[in-house]
Image (cartoon, grey):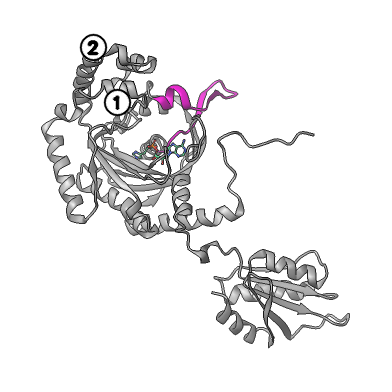
């Protein structure tokens, strides 16, 4: 029978890779905890309307990339392509937003039907933070500080650039869109089909075009920053001052517009040149209109999301995942002889109790000493404990042999110790 394969662009994360993911998750958890953010979990499936009304009906994500279907009741549902819309829906539905301040974080899989390549997948994962009820720019800077702290913890600061832009209010962008459409209509011969469509539906998205002809047509295009209102400019200036004073480096990129429609004022991306074309590792900004747009009361909001796969790729290529994190196991207990299973299970549990930070596996399924030792080497454990019964009795064992396992497969040390005290000491000195 033909074997079934995973869906293209949807990756399995195998045990060896999971260790790096866990390391990253632990760092993220500790950083957001340090900033007082609280976790929120919401479903991967939502009404399609939620994404249309938030990300924008004429955005690439909604037009081309959503996994949408009618369920058995005839409701049109979509797998979430991002977390902000679901987070706002959940927080508002449960009364967390009105007249309150919230600092929230989430993580989990997102789904976009994009053309898969390195760093771009159809199921990918995000860590996100969203802050509600604060007008900024201090909170925008705090949110950026969360990301900057994470990069610092991971040793990635030198490999990431923060690009920021001020896209003003919805009104500013409306005026700008008119100006841009008029300008583009004088450059039709250089526009591709996509840009010609977009210039009427969502002209600002033309700025993002990868087509070099379109880019050359944009050289003299009006700039969004010339249409931004004064309040927004003042906030943006303050934001830059705060970033400077906190030592968070940034570049101003007047062409940065983001692919989701809900933003206003400050938007940003952290990018790297290590990942080729998929260089955006984190993106976000302010979205003060979204809660109201989804039926709630006007609530200020800002946040970002990090692409976890891209971060893992970065950590791998820069060798930044610490070696001890990649060690799956500390102790492997081999059990030789008759009626030995219970002793093995008891001893491994005693070690776990006494040294909760150690990973302990007790061999199961029987087999000869040599085979068990091979498995011990293969397991990646640092130490093998060998429990051996010579006769057929079932009295408790008082001794174990211990072998330090090194990568070459040699056993360097063999020692007999009392169980459990001395064994504990040996482990304390040998396994970290
Ligand atoms: P986004 O820029 O669409 O923003 O996605 C955030 C990050 O998710 C990107 O910078 C990238 O690292 C990662 N990402 C996006 N698409 C893919 C993909 N197909 N494969 C792998 N990684 C991907 C948002 O999603 C907003 N919700 C961020 C936000 C939160 N804004 C305010 N709050």
Magenta residues, start to end: 60-83
> Which residue carries the number 1 mark?
207
- For the residues carrying marks 1 and 2, which lies nearer the camera in this image? 2
Determine the residue positioned at 21% across, 56% down.
246
Asked whether 318 falls inside the magenta stretch, the response is no
User: Which of these two is toward me, 349 or 216?
Assistant: 216
> Around disc 1, counting alpha carbons within 10 Å, would you say few (fewer than 14), some (14 to 19), or many (20 or more)?
some
Mark yes or no: residue 204 visible: no
Left or right: 397 as drawn, with respect to 35? right
The outermost residue toward the right is 392
Q: Gap between marks 1 and 2, in whole Å?
A: 16 Å
Mark yes or no: residue 346 visible: yes
Q: Which mark is residue 186?
A: 2
Determine the residue positioned at 39% across, 48% down.
105
User: Which of these two is toward me, 215 or 147?
Assistant: 215
Ligand 1 falls in which quarter? top left
């Amino acid at each position: 029978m033909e074997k079934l394969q995973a869906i293209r662009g949807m990756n399995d994360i195998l045990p060896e890779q999971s260790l790096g993911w866990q390391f990253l998750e632990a760092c993220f958890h500790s950083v957001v905890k340090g900033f007082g953010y609280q976790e929120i979990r919401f479903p991967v499936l939502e009404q399609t309307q939620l994404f249309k009304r938030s990300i924008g009906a004429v955005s690439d994500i909604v037009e081309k990339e959503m996994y949408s279907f009618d369920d058995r009741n005839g409701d049109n549902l979509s797998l979430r392509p991002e977390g902000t819309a679901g987070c706002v829906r959940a927080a508002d539905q449960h009364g967390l937003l009105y007249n309150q301040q919230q600092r929230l974080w989430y993580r989990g899989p997102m789904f976009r039907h994009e053309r898969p390549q390195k760093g771009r997948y159809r199921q990918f994962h995000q860590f996100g933070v969203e802050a509600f009820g604060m007008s900024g720019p201090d909170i925008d800077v705090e949110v950026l500080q969360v990301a900057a702290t994470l990069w610092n913890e991971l040793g990635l600061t030198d490999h990431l650039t923060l690009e920021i832009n001020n896209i003003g209010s919805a009104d500013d962008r409306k005026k700008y869109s008119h100006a841009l459409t008029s300008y583009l209509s004088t450059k039709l011969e250089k526009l591709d089909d996509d840009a010609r469509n977009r210039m009427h539906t969502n002209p600002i998205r033309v700025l993002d075009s990868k087509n070099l002809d379109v880019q050359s047509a944009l050289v003299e295009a009006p700039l969004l920053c010339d249409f931004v209102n004064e309040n927004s400019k003042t906030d943006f200036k303050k934001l830059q001052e705060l970033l400077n004073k906190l030592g968070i480096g940034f570049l101003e990129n007047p062409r940065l517009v983001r692919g989701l429609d809900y933003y206003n004022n400050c938007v940003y991306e952290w990018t790297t040149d290590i990942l080729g074309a998929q260089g955006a590792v984190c993106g976000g900004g302010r979205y003060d209109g979204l809660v109201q747009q989804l039926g709630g009361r006007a609530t200020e909001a800002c946040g970002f999301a990090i692409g976890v796969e891209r971060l893992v790729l970065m950590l791998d290529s820069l060798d930044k995942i610490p070696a001890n994190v990649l060690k799956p196991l500390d102790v492997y207990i081999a059990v030789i002889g008759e009626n030995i299973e219970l002793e093995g299970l008891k001893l491994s549990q005693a070690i776990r109790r006494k040294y909760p930070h150690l990973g302990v596996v007790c061999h199961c399924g029987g087999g000869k000493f040599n085979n068990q030792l091979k498995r011990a080497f293969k397991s990646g454990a640092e130490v093998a404990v060998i429990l051996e019964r010579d006769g057929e009795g079932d009295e408790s064992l008082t001794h174990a042999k211990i072998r330090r396992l090194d990568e070459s497969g040699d056993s360097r040390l063999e020692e007999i110790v009392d169980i459990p005290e001395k064994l504990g000491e040996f482990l304390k000195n040998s396994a970290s």
